Image (tube, rainbow, N blue to C red):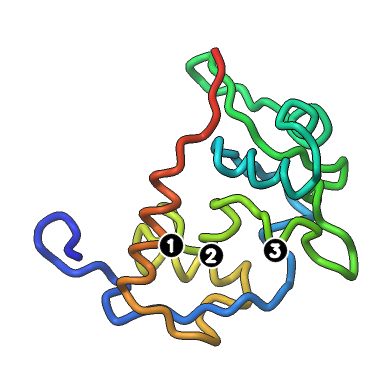
């Protein structure tokens, strides 16, 4: 896979990442976890709720600059994800959204070596552990980019 201009992406030799379960991406600071229809269906099934019941119990709408709204998981008043449980991690781990499944292989984090290193200052799993090949990284990035977040308005 080549970047614009025919040069290889900075991750062409692979990147090291293994989740350390530090919860950096799940709690303690504001954030959003946008949901696609597939994510909503998988989570609602996991919770044994209808999609509407799940939306009412676990989701919020985030207003965008264009006046539309995107569906996101709720966060608690302390900024923890609604599914984060101290000492137990993610309650919905097996049904977690694509956004969670593909971290840290997101567009902004893979924008360049500097972005990767900046994220690594927050996430101790970045730069250590399993070596992910360029093809696997590109596949995760494509899945992240391809998800169609639920929008209204």
Residue 79 locus on image (x, y percent): 80, 46
Q: Is 114 in front, or is 76?
A: 76
Discs 2, 1 touching: Cβ within 8 Å: yes
Residue 3 locus on image (x, y percent): 19, 59
- Say whether disc 1 or disc 3 marks the residue closer to the N-terminus: 3
Discs 2, 3 touching: Cβ within 8 Å: no
Q: Is 16 in front, or is 137?
A: 137
Per the image, label 3 sits on a secondary structure element best described as: loop
Residue 28 locus on image (x, y percent): 79, 55
- Say whether disc 2 or disc 3 marks the residue closer to the N-terminus: 3
Q: Is 107 in front, or is 137?
A: 137
Residue at horizontal 40 percent and vertical 47 percent from the top = 145
Provide the residue designation for mark 1.
Answer: 115
Per the image, label 1 sits on a secondary structure element best described as: helix
Provide the residue designation for mark 2.
Answer: 119
Per the image, label 2 sits on a secondary structure element best described as: helix
Q: CA distance from mark 1 to mark 3?
A: 16 Å
Q: CA distance from mark 2 to mark 1?
A: 6 Å
Q: Is 28 in front, or is 90?
A: 90
- The dot on residue 76 is none
Quarter of the figure that contains the N terminus? bottom left
Discs 1, 3 touching: Cβ within 8 Å: no
Closest to the camera, between mark 2 and mark 3, is 3
Q: Is residue 8 above or below residue 92?
A: below
Residue 16 locus on image (x, y percent): 47, 81
Provide the residue designation for mark 3.
Answer: 24
Residue at horizontal 56 percent and vertical 35 percent from the top = 37
Residue at horizontal 47 percent and vertical 71 percent from the top = 117
Closest to the camera, between mark 1 and mark 3, is 3
């Amino acid at each position: 896979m080549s970047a614009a201009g025919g040069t290889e992406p900075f991750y062409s030799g692979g990147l090291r990442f293994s989740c350390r379960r530090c919860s950096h991406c799940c709690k303690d600071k504001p954030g959003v976890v946008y949901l696609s229809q597939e994510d909503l269906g998988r989570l609602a099934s996991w919770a044994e709720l209808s999609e509407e019941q799940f939306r009412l119990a676990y989701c919020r709408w985030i207003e965008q600059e264009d006046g539309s709204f995107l569906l996101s998981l709720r966060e608690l008043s302390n900024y923890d994800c609604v599914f984060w449980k101290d000492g137990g991690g993610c309650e919905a781990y097996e049904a977690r959204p694509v956004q969670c499944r593909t971290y840290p292989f997101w567009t902004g984090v893979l924008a360049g070596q500097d972005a990767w290193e900046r994220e690594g200052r927050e996430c101790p799993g970045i730069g250590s552990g399993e070596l992910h090949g360029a093809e696997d990284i590109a596949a995760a990035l494509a899945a992240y980019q391809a998800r169609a977040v639920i929008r209204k308005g």
